[in-house]
Amino acid sequence: MTRQDAASVCKAILRGAAAVPAFALVYWWSPVAAGIAAALLLALLADGIARPGSSLLYPTRTRGSRQQPYVALTFDDGPDPEVTPAVLDALARHGARATFFVIGRALHAHPALGRRIEAEHHELGNHSLNHSRWQNFFCESRQRKEIEGGAGAIAELAQRAEPPLYRPPIGLKSPPFARAARALQLSVIAWSLHSHDSRTSDPQRIARRVLARIRPGDIVLMHDGHDLSGRHRPACAQALPQILQGLREKGLQCVTVSELLRLRGAENRSAWAQALWNGLKAHFGLKMLAGWLIAGGFFAAYFLLLRFPLFPVTLMPVTALDQWIAFWPGALWLYVSLWLYVALAPGLLTDRRELLNYYLGMLALSVAGMAVFLLWPSASPRADVDWHSYPPFGPVIAADDAGNALPSLHAAFAVYSAIWLDRLLRRADAPGWPRLVSAAWALGILYSTLATRQHVAVDIYAGSALGWLAAVLHACWLQTLRPVGAGMDPSPVTARAVPRTDAELLHANRSFYDLLWRDAQLVAPQRFNTWPLVCALVATSQRRLEVAPGLRPRLPIMGTHFIDISAPALARLSRGGGLGVTGQIGALPLPDGAFDLVCALDIIEHVDDDEGALSELARVSTPGAALLLSVPLHPAQWTAFDDFVGHRRRYEPQSLQRKLDRHGFTVDRSAIYGMQPKSSQLLDLGLWFLVHRRARAMWWYNRVLMPLGLHFQKELEWKPGLIDDLEVAEIILLCRRSSPA
C-alpha cells in the first residue's frame, strides 16, 4: 500500500472520528459512549471494505426491482472450456440470458467461448485481468491496470463502445479501488444471492439454496470458472438445469444484469420517495381517526390495569446495564418520539385492507402485553432522581409512575414498528440510509427508556422480544392472506392502464394457474358440453394436441399430447396417460403437420403475439385438421377478471375472422361458450375471495361452484360461421385447416 493509500484510509477514519462528538450530543458524553461510537464507525468502514454489496466506498448495485418478475444469473471466473459450454447449453435450452463476468486472461485463452457468449445474446462483464486474490491491497495505478486489462480483452472481442459492467475479485473494495473506479466511471455490480457453488460440489445443494431463497430482482452469483489455473467448478453446470426449471415454475425470467437494471430505470431511483409520499397522502383522515381511537382505547386499558392491579406488584431487578447507563434528561424527546415513530408504518400504507391488518397486529401486541400486566403486575424501582428539578418529566411521572413495567410496551412498539418500517422501505426499493435512520431511531427509543429511568433493562429485553415475536407472527399470518401470484400489487386491477410485456404476462398467467391447478381437482373431459363434438372429431382423428388444458382438458387424456406452462397441471395429466410437455403456444416444441385435431381453448387472448400463436397452431396442424378455439369477445366488456388472469385482449368478431383467414383457418361453426356470470358484482366478489381467501375460495370452487356449473351448463348450440352478437362475451369455434394464405 502506498503512502497515498494509507493517507486515504486515515482520512476515512478521521472523518468517522469527527462524528463522535455528534454521537455524544445525542447519547450524552462519556468515555463509554465515545468508545461505542468509534467502534461502530470502524465496523462501518470494515463493512464498506469487506461486504460486496456495500456502497460506502463506491456505489454498488446488488439487485433490480422487486416489482418485476425478472432475475439475473451471473457467472464469474470464466470462460472455462470444461464448464462454460455446458452452462451455455442449459441457458439455450431454457431460453434464458445471463451475464458472464470473465477474467481477462481466461478470455484471451478461450476467445471462441467469448464469441459464443456474445452470439447467444448473453452479456460479458469485466472481472479484472488476472483476478488476484490480493487485488484489494493494490495501489490505485495497479488497480486501474487490472480493470483496464479486463475491459480491453472484452473490447477486442465484443467491439462495443460502452464499458462493460465491473465486478471486483471476491467482491472486495478499498479506497484505492474507489479512486480508480471513479476515474474510470465504473458501474460496479455485486449480488444479492450467493449460490455457494464455490463452497460445495453438490449440485443438489446449490439448486436447493438458490430456489429456496430467490426473489424477483435478485442478482445471483455462480461460477463457471476458477481463478486458479487447472481447477474447475463443474457443480455450477450440473445444478443449472434444475435452477432454470425451478425459476420457470416460479414465473421468473432470466435476463442480463444490464437488462435487469434498465427495467428498474434511472427515473425510478427516487421512485421510492414518491411511493412513500403517496402512502402518507392515502387515507390520511382515516389514519388520523384510527390512530386517535386506537391510542385512546390503549391508554384507557393501560391505566385501568395500572391503577387497579389484580395481584401483588413485582419489583423488577436493577442490572449492571442500568447502572452503566447514566440518567440523561435530554433523552426525554427520544422517549416521547415513539408516538410519532409508531405512526410512520401505517402512515405509509396505501391499501385499506393492509392497513386494517396492520392495526390488528398492533392490537394483538397490546392485548398480549396487557395480559401479562393483568396476570403478573410489575413495576420498575423508583429512580433516585428529584423529578421536581426536571419539569418536562412531570406529565410522564404523574401518568406512569414506573408501573406496568414488564414487558415494556414502549420497547415492544418500537421494535415492532422498526421491523415493519424496514419491510415497507425494502418493498419500496428505498436505499440503505432511510433504513439505517429508522433503525437508529428505534435504538434511540430503547436507550431513552433506560436513560430517562422509565424502565430497567429486564423490561426492555422482554418488550423487545415481544415486539419481535409479534412482528414475525404477524408476517406469517399475512402470508396466509397473500394474493394469488406472489409479488402482485395488493390493490385491485380495474383497467389496462399500463401495457404488460411478454414476460409480465407469462408471470401473471403462470402465477395464477400454478396456484389454481395446485389446489384444483382434475375434471374429466366427458363432463363438459364440448364432449359430444369431441367424440365425433376423435373418431376420425388419431393424432391429438391440446394447448393449455390445465386440469380442464376437453380431449381424451389417454394418448393426447398436452402443452402447458403449469407444471402441476402437466403432472396430473401425465399420470392419466397424457403426453405432457412444458411449453408456450408461441413456440410449440412439436414437429410440423403432426396433428389432425388441435384444441386451444382460452389461450390466444393470453399472449402478446397472437399472430405468432395462430401461426404455430397452423404449423403443427395437417391440411384438413380440426381446430377447437375459444376466445372472449368485445373489448368494451373488459372486467377486472381479465386483468387478473392475464388476458391481453378481447376480440372484435370481424378482426378475429381476418386473423384466422390469414393463417389458413376457415370457421366451420361457432357457439356461445363459457360459464362466467354476467353480473359484474358476482365477478368482483369472486375475484376478492380468490385474492384474499384463496384456500377458502378454491374449496368452494372445486366442491360447489364447479360441480354446479357443470350440472347446469347448457348444450352448445352450434351456428354456421362466426357468431357476431354484442351480447355474447365468449364463443367457441370449430375451424378447419386449409392452406396458408
Image (cartoon, grey):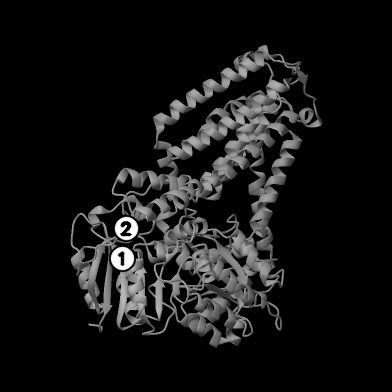
Picture layout, residue 376 above or below residue 160: above
Q: Which residue is mark 1?
A: 630
N-terminal-most mark, 1 or 2: 1
| Residue placed under numbered mark 2 in the picture | 674
Task: Tell me if 663 is positioned left or right of 444 in this view.
Answer: left
Picture quadrant of residue 555? bottom left
Left or right: 547 with respect to 496? right
Q: Amino acid at mark 1?
A: Ser
Q: Position of residue 315 (x, y in %)?
A: 78, 20
User: The disc labelled 2 sits on which kind of residue?
Assistant: Gly
Image check: 724 left or right of 23? left
Instruction: Point out residue 93 in the picture as x, y percentages from the top left corner.
Output: 51, 78
Q: Would residue 4 be seen by someone viewing this image from the given angle?
A: yes
Helix, strand or loop for disc 2: loop
Residue 389 figure quarter: top right
Check if mark 1's residue and mark 2's residue have beta carbons within 8 Å: yes
Category of crowding for the residue at label 2, using alpha-carbon neighbours closer than 10 angstroms: few (below 14), some (14–19), many (at least 20): some
Distance between mark 1 and mark 2 Cα atoms: 9 Å
Quadrant where the C terminus sits is: bottom left
Closer to us: 15 or 610 = 610
Would you place residue 10 above or below residue 721 in this image? above
* Residue beneath the point at 25% across and 84% down: 739
Give 553 or 241, whichever is nearer the viewer. 553
Residue appearing at x 23%, y 73% in the figure: 668
Helix, strand or loop at mark 1: strand
Q: In this rendered view, identify the residue nearer to me: 175 or 203.
A: 203
Question: x, y (%) of residue 149?
Answer: 57, 78
Q: Which mark is residue 488?
A: none
Rendered view: 381 above or below 502:
above
State the count of labels: 2
